[in-house]
Each structure stands twice: as C-alpha cells, then as structure tokens.
Image: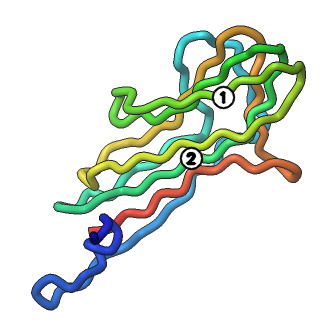
C-alpha cells in the first residue's frame, strides 16, 4: 500500500512534485497559567497556497509542569479554528515532559498557529540551549 508521501512523489504523467518546508520556533521559555486555549507566542506560519497538496505538520515540545497531576494540552489552529489537541500530564512537581502532535492539512494557504492550555498550575514551554520545541512543516503538491 502506498502512503501519502510516496503518492505525492510518484510521477503521474511526467510531472514532478513541489516540496517546501518551514519551521516554527516559538519564543523561548514562555509560560502559561491559562485554562482556556491561547496562542503560543511567535508560533505561526503561513501554509503554501497550492492546489491538490498536503502540509505534513509535526509539533514537538518540551513542557515544564509546576504541579503534580497537572495536565497540559498543545494543538494546532488553522485560520482561527482549533483543529487538533493532545495532552501530557505529570505526577511530580517541576518535571519537564516531551509532547508531540502531528496532523496533515490541505495546502490551501491559511495561517497555522500553535496553541496551548494548562489544567491548573503553570506550564513553561522550554525552548533554549537545553531543551528545544519546534514545529516542522513539509508541504508537498
């Protein structure tokens, strides 16, 4: 069975694929105490505006959680609509945990924004010399 990436690179009728990539690197070491979903600072990108293409997005973050049994959600928003969220939690205080989220979008343009929330306590998005948090986007059409 052919997966989406293999299909995008196959030469249908002699044409080739157009591939672009971009990376979102959020502002380092930002914190939130918000229990509602809010934007992550400096964490937006404009998707390619090409017909019949796909944007493969992967967001990997290191989150420090202040309180035991704390839950943190990260997610994608496209053009003002929340699309997908995932969560991580801890049972100890001041623990840094890794969290990852992947999703495929159509390459119809639009703004992709990284978002987050916390269920109690304070969460810190770690992005510096010791820990890295990034979103990589591969656009294929």
Quadrant position of residue 125: top right
Q: Is residue 97 left or right of residue 86?
A: right
Dot 1: element: strand
Residues under labels 1 and 2: Cα distance? Answer: 14 Å
Residue at 24%, 84% (x, y): give it: 16
Report whether 37 appears left or right of 1: right
Left or right, residue 52 beside residue 46: left
Q: Residue at (32%, 74%) from the top-left corner?
A: 6
Residue at 47 percent across and 57 percent down: it is 137
**In contact (CB < 8 Å): disc 1 and disc 2:** no
Q: Position of residue 15 (x, y in %)?
A: 18, 86
Looking at the rendered structure, which numbered label has been put on residue 69? Answer: none
Mark 2 = which residue? 59
Which of the image's four quarters has the N terminus?
Answer: bottom left
Identify the colour scheme used: rainbow
Q: Is residue 130 above or below residue 98?
A: below
Q: Specify the quadrant of the image occupied by residue 89.
A: top right
Tell which circle, 1 or 2, labels the residue nearer the N-terminal end.
2
Q: Residue at point 18% right, 61% down?
A: 52
Residue matched to label 1: 88
- Local crowd at mark 1 within 10 Å, few (<14), some, or many (≥20)? some
């Amino acid at each position: 069975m052919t997966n989406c990436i293999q299909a995008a690179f196959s030469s249908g009728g002699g044409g080739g694929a157009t591939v672009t990539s971009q990376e979102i690197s959020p502002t380092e070491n930002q914190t939130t105490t918000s229990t509602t979903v809010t934007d992550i600072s400096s964490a937006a990108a404009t998707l390619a505006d090409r017909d019949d293409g796909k944007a493969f997005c992967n967001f990997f973050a290191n989150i420090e959680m202040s309180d035991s049994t704390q839950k943190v959600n990260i997610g994608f928003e496209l053009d003002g609509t929340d699309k997908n969220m995932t969560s991580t939690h801890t049972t100890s205080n001041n623990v840094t945990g890794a969290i990852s989220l992947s999703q495929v979008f159509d390459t119809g343009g639009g703004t992709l924004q990284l978002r987050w929330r916390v269920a109690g306590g304070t969460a810190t998005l770690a992005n510096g010399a010791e820990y890295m948090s990034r979103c990589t986007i591969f656009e294929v059409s």
